[in-house]
């Protein structure tokens, strides 16, 4: 095989492996916080036309547990707050929106 074909093969394998690790539409990931359980729903984001690569790995690393978020980070426009700012998606600063992500 020539170098171009080998490079394309490797790139394809890396892309498929990344997709295997992502939360696919219809799946959720849940983690516990001091403000209740947070549930990330892949379907909600897919329905909103958000592509996985918009957040991974530009905003979030592709390793489970590699990101520790605080609400102050979100309010400052980091992590989920990059989009959840009241312009592109609901605002994390609005207390009426807490239960969208935080389940008691």
Image (tube, rainbow, N blue to C red):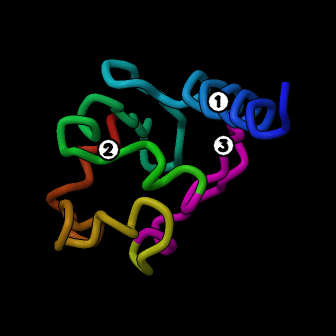
Could you tell me what secondary structure mostly forms the magenta stretch?
Answer: loop
Circle 1 residues within 10 Å: few <14, some 14–19, many ≥20: few
* Left or right: 75 as drawn, with respect to 33: left
2 vs 3, front mark? 3
Residue 67 highlighted magenta (yes or no): yes
Per the rendering, the mark at residue 101 is 2
Q: Nearer the viewer, mark 1 or mark 2?
A: 1
Residue for badge 1: 12
Q: Tag 2 or tag 1, which sits nearer the N-term?
A: 1
Residue range (magenta) = 58-74
The correct choice, above or below, for 44 with respect to 51 in the image is: above
Q: Which residue is drawn at 44% across and 36% down?
A: 37
Spatial CA distance of label 1 from label 2 is: 33 Å
The residue at the far front in this view is: 2
Image position, residue 30 (x, y; %): 48, 30
Do the numbered discs 1 and 2 sit on residues whose CB atoms are within 8 Å? Answer: no
Question: Measured from the top left, where is residue 57 in percent x and y?
Answer: 60, 53
Q: How many marks?
A: 3
37 on left or right of 50:
right
Element carrying mark 2 = helix
Q: Does the magenta stretch include residue 80?
A: no
Residue located 43% across and 49% down the image: 35
Q: Which of marks 2 and 3 is nearer the N terminus?
A: 3
Q: Position of residue 49 (x, y in %)?
A: 22, 45
Secondary structure at badge 1 equals helix
Left or right of residue 51, residue 93 in this image: left
Q: In which quarter of the image is the C terminus?
A: top left
Task: Give me the residue at 29% from left, 64% from top.
Answer: 84
Residue in the image at 47% along x and 54% along y: 55
Q: What element carries label 3?
A: loop
What residue is disc 3 on? 62
């Amino acid at each position: 095989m020539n170098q171009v074909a080998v490079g394309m093969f490797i790139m394809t394998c890396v892309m498929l492996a990344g997709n295997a690790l992502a939360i696919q539409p219809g799946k959720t990931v849940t983690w516990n916080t001091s403000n209740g359980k947070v549930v990330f729903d892949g379907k909600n984001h897919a329905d909103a036309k958000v592509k996985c690569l918009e957040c991974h790995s530009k905003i979030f690393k592709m390793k489970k547990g590699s990101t520790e978020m605080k609400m102050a980070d979100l309010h400052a426009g980091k992590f989920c707050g990059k989009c959840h700012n009241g312009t592109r998606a609901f605002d994390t600063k609005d207390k009426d929106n807490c239960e969208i992500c935080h389940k008691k």
